[in-house]
Image (cartoon, rainbow, N blue to C red):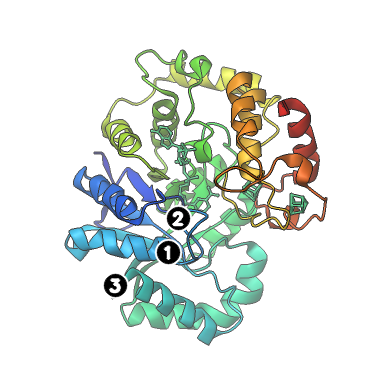
Amino acid sequence: MQYRKYAGTDIKLSALGFGAMRLPDDDDFAVECMQHALDGGLNFIDSAPGYRGGSEREPGSSEKLVGRAIKAVPRDQVYVSTKNATGCPSASEWREGLENSLRNLDTDYIDFYQLVHGMRWESYTEAFRPNAWEEALKARDEGLIRHFSFSSHDSPENIIKLLEEGIFESCIIQYNLLDRANEPVIDYARENGISILVMGPVGGGRLGMRSEQLESIVSGVRSTPELALRFVLNNPGVTTALSGMNTIEMIDENIATASLDSALSDDEMAAIEETLKKNEALAELYCTGCDYCMPCPQNVGISRIFAAMNMHRVWGMTEAAKQRYARLGPESRSGLLQADACVECGSCETLCPQNIPIIEQLKESHEALKG
Ligand SMILES: NC(=O)c1ccc[n+]([C@@H]2O[C@H](COP(=O)([O-])OP(=O)(O)OC[C@H]3O[C@@H](n4cnc5c(N)ncnc54)[C@H](OP(=O)(O)O)[C@@H]3O)[C@@H](O)[C@H]2O)c1
Ligand code: SF4
Ligand code: SF4
């Protein structure tokens, strides 16, 4: 495993972190997966109070499972990140959010606290700074939080503005082969000694499936997720790539990739960029599968539909995409429905951090993938 220094500290974070947003359905196996990763040298796990770790669980379940997993190692040998999702209406409610996470995680302190889950410039200036900043300082003085950070889906310009405030040691932002918009943020952070923790390095699963086209660009690459992780870790401004992994095989593969010290060459990077440009026009859907848009009142399987649509549109895997789409319906285990169940209420669109025109894209997806 490669280890990289965290901000201005002596902390060495594993280049691969465990993102506990999606976890296997079985609780014991979810814990086993995280502990397997810790055995393999990973030392960083990210969670959030809103993460269920699977649609069948209650919010907070991910933190509780992380709390169970980290019992396997001495507390000072694992770094835990979680987030404050209260929206900072008041100091006391922000504090309540923190205490709730500490309880869920069953720990005395949080190493990297995302002071606001999904911070935006407006939420920073209008809510966090006036209502919760003093409370955050107090919590750090009390030893409940070790390092100030935030996660964000705001524009790169606004994320840089947040970093310019000079109070954060790191931030969690999205970055992958399919979404490079945050490269200026990564450059700014690198120049200013701030750590970048990447969410969605495997494109939220879009780069988990085989793309012979991408794999053929770099000789010796064994799989598309390997190329995806190598691409992210090749950026010298990235400290850790937080990947969601729900099988032992994925964990082993990603640990092996994060242990490679071979950087991509300039020629390989240029070839990747050329291919991506060609695909860009096709890839209008940038759904990360975060499920912030759920639950849909009509039970439309939004992220699953978009995952299938990307398989078809971007990577030309149409048969596999249609098979995936056909699995949705009232008889399916999840009960999630195909796109034609949408009644265009619009509630999902206001929640999507990627600003995807969901209603329109659902219609296109149904036309392309229906039987
Ligand atoms: N993405 C977001 O919007 C977001 C927001 C806030 C925070 N975060 C944080 O960032 C973490 C990571 O985000 P993410 O879960 O979107 O990360 P990701 O690593 O980009 O996506 C995870 C998915 O990629 C696929 N995958 C990963 N490694 C693979 C491998 N070796 N082989 C095949 N498939 C592989 C799996 O897809 P399948 O399950 O489909 O097989 C897996 O569920 C989250 O857990 C969370 O802690 C993310
Ligand atoms: S617009 Fe359609 S997909 Fe979105 S929440 Fe409403 S019914 Fe569900
Ligand atoms: S449509 Fe938007 S909110 Fe819904 S899963 Fe995709 S990226 Fe997330």
Q: Which of marks 1 and 2 is nearer the N terminus?
A: 2
- Read off the residue under disc 1: 61
Q: Are marks 1 and 2 in contact (CB under 8 Å)?
A: yes
Res 107 label: 3
Mark 3 → mark 2, Cα distance in angstroms: 19 Å
Q: How dense is the environment of label 2, judged by Cα within 10 Å: few (below 14), some, or many (20 and up)?
A: many
- Read off the residue under disc 2: 53
Q: Residue at x 45, y 25 (%)?
A: 224
Q: In which quarter of the image is residue 78?
A: bottom left
Observer-side mark, 3 or 1, equals 1
Would you say 17 lies left or right of 178 here? left
Would you say 354 lies left or right of 92 here? right
Q: Residue at x 21, y 45 (%)?
A: 41
Q: In which quarter of the image is the N terminus?
A: top left
Seen in the picture, residue 109 relative to 248 is either above or below; the reply is below
Q: Earlier in the sequence, mark 3 or mark 2?
A: 2
The amino acid marked with disc number 3 is Thr
Q: Do the residues labelled 3 and 2 touch (CB within 8 Å)?
A: no
Seen in the picture, residue 47 relative to 359 is either above or below; the reply is below
As helix, strand or loop, the secondary structure at mark 2 comes to: loop
Observer-side mark, 3 or 2, equals 2
Q: Quadrant of residue 231?
A: top left
Would you say 217 lies left or right of 15 here? right
Q: Position of residue 346 (x, y in %)?
A: 80, 55
As helix, strand or loop, the secondary structure at mark 3 comes to: loop
Q: How many marks?
A: 3
The amino acid marked with disc number 1 is Ser
